[in-house]
Image (cartoon, helix red, strand yellow):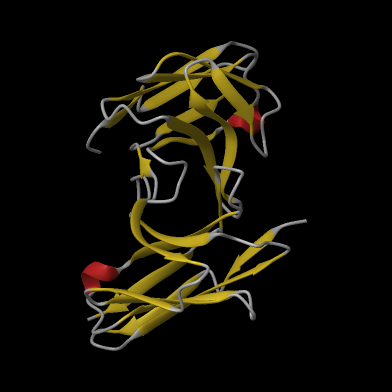
């Protein structure tokens, strides 16, 4: 069956460092992969999408990579700030299904 | 969240009672989704809609039904609420079925006692 795993439920890093979050998947052939941010008590907010034929995508301090051979995506936040503290979710689409399947998320805490 | 609202935001109900949650959008997006979010399980798809009166089941559809009689409204009904349906429910919308991301509502926290 299809499975998405995000590395460690919680990740703590020091302000100014680069945070790296991992999303691994099995038994998928996604057309694209997405990353969302979720703050406590709020709905997820879309951040970035990367397609299967793209290796890397950037948006301001965010960078996403997508390795379809390793079946893995890495999500980087450079120069991290306490305001980046949140839970980050990855989500995969299997193309024709017109729906996303989400990982359980990684809770990031940026320490001042 | 801009263009999508969920109601109610919080609800406590008794086991065995029917419950309806509402999702309303002003974006005229074709696709609408209902997810539930539970600790350790993440977001799981309950039902989704790809047009008026067009709906399909998701991963955890047992005990739930949906209706979409207008583009802007997507209703989720718990036919006979159980304690296992205590959860936070999120509605999401998409213009293209996810190719450019989903927009989520703020969620409904449902407690079944």
Where is A64 relative to B42, above or below?
A: below
Q: Position of residue B70 (x, y in %)?
A: 40, 13
Give the residue at x 44% y 50%: B99
Q: Tell me which corner region of the image, top left, top right, bottom left or bottom right, holds residue B105.
A: top left
Give the residue at x 57% y 11%: B18
Q: Position of residue A78 (x, y in %)?
A: 28, 83
Give the residue at x 54% y 38%: B36
> Along the horizontal axis of the image, is A77 left or right of B18?
left
- Quadrant holding the C terminus of chain A: bottom left
Q: Residue furthest right?
A: A1
Q: Nearer the viewer, residue B54 or B89?
A: B54
Q: Nearer the viewer, residue A56 or A102?
A: A56
Give the residue at x 55% y 42%: A98
Q: Nearer the viewer, residue A71 or B10?
A: A71
Q: Position of residue B89 (x, y in %)?
A: 48, 34
Q: Tell me which corner region of the image, top left, top right, bottom left or bottom right, holds residue B14.
A: top right
Q: Tell me which corner region of the image, top left, top right, bottom left or bottom right, holds residue B74.
A: top left
């Amino acid at each position: 069956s299809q499975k998405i795993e995000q590395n460690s439920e919680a990740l703590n890093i020091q302000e100014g460092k680069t945070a790296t979050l991992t999303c691994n998947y099995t038994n998928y052939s996604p057309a694209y992969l997405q990353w969302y941010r979720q703050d406590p008590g709020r709905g997820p907010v879309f951040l970035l999408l990367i397609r299967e034929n793209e290796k890397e995508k950037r948006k301001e301090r965010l960078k996403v990579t997508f390795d379809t051979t390793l079946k893995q995506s890495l999500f980087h936040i450079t120069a991290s700030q306490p305001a980046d503290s949140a839970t980050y979710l990855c989500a995969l689409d299997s193309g024709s299904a017109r729906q996303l399947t989400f990982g359980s998320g990684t809770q990031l805490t940026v320490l001042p | 969240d801009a263009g999508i609202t969920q109601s109610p935001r919080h609800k406590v109900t008794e086991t065995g009672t029917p419950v309806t949650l509402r999702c309303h959008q002003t974006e005229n997006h074709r696709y609408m989704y209902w997810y539930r979010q539970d600790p350790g399980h993440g977001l799981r798809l309950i039902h989704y809609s790809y047009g008026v009166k067009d709906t399909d089941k998701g991963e955890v559809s047992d005990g739930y039904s949906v209706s979409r009689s207008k583009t802007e409204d997507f209703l989720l009904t718990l036919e006979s609420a159980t304690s296992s349906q205590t959860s936070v429910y999120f509605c999401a919308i998409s213009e293209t079925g996810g190719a450019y991301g989903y927009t989520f509502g703020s969620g409904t926290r449902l407690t079944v006692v």
